[in-house]
Image: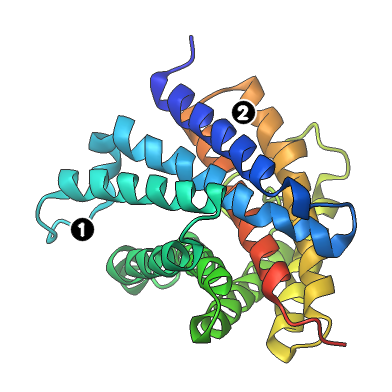
Amino acid sequence: MTSPVVLWPSLAGIVFLGIGLITARKQLSFHSGKLAGVGPAFVAAALAAFGVEHLVAARSIMQIIPSWIPGPLFWTYLVGIALLAAAVSLALKCYVRLAATLLGIMFLLFVLLIHLPNVAASPKQRLYWAILLRDLAFGGGAWALAGGRVAVIGRFSIAVAAVFFAAVYFLHPDIAPGVPLPKLTPAWVPLRLLWGYLMGALLLLGGAAVLVNRHARRATTWLAMAVTLSVLLIYTPLMALAPTVEAMNYVADTLLFAGTIWLLAQTCPDSP
């Protein structure tokens, strides 16, 4: 029997993905410029999954909150509710700018209060850098969606993370494509190292294109499609084979990264 810690976040993610896609259905087509409309739906689905996980597994998740912050259980529940509120806003497309701005601030606080101290304590630990830049990219995607001045900061944050991730994949192509965390590409995937190199190349091209503002929309669209395929062809089958909390988190995490890149592609200037 599937654990409630896996079941309820997974159901929440599926429901919000459906709602988000229904809301965006009139904006979607197979034209690359129109596909970026899936971004808010993907982000909403992942946020809903993580939000519910914060509520049903609060005592486990609260362990990552720094010891100097009082009331860790309260903050865990509050973050869960905030994630769900952002998911509702993005899925239904209501108060999007406000929700996206606040979501970006929340991810920035994660970076400053949790991930940056970890990096400072262990600067040679690649995983800590990857997690820090991952959350910085997630916040950047939210700010790209919010628009205005923060959108420029958001796009830059994603681009920097993409270039770093590219370097990791070139050095460790056996890591499962998406976000370079400890999960390795399964042995049943044909040409498994090729996908790591390909993901690295697309990350490098996408990040560089955004930084120099040349062909950014095209490059990030290809990157977003590649990360989306990773969710569908690698992480989702892994969860189907072994529905664990870890597998669910990898699905939601990579889906959130895919949605972040789609938001970037949607908001990049259509430069030559």
Task: Give the residue displayed 73% in from the left and 49% down from the top.
Answer: 228
Task: Give the residue displayed 70% in from the left and 29% down from the top.
Answer: 237
Amino acid type indicated by mark 1: Pro
The answer for how far apart the CA atoms under marks 2 and 1 are is 30 Å
Q: Residue 66 shows which numbered tag?
A: 1
Q: Residue 23 shows which numbered tag?
A: none
Residue 211 placement, left or right of 31: left
The percent coordinates of residue 255 (x first, y second) are 62, 47
Say whether disc 2 or disc 1 marks the residue closer to the N-terminus.
1
Q: Residue furthest top?
A: 1
Q: What residue is shown with label 2? A: 239
Q: Work out whether residue 229 or residue 12 is closer to the camera in this orientation and state it.
A: 12
The percent coordinates of residue 195 (x first, y second) are 81, 52
The percent coordinates of residue 184 (x first, y second) are 65, 44
Q: Work out whether residue 84 or residue 191 is closer to the camera in this orientation and state it.
A: 84
Quadrant (top left/top right/bottom left/bottom right) for the C terminus: bottom right
Q: Residues within 10 Å of mark 2 (few under 14, many from 20)?
A: some
Q: Work out whether residue 57 or residue 165 is closer to the camera in this orientation and state it.
A: 57
Residue 40 placement, left or right of 213: left
Amino acid type indicated by mark 2: Met
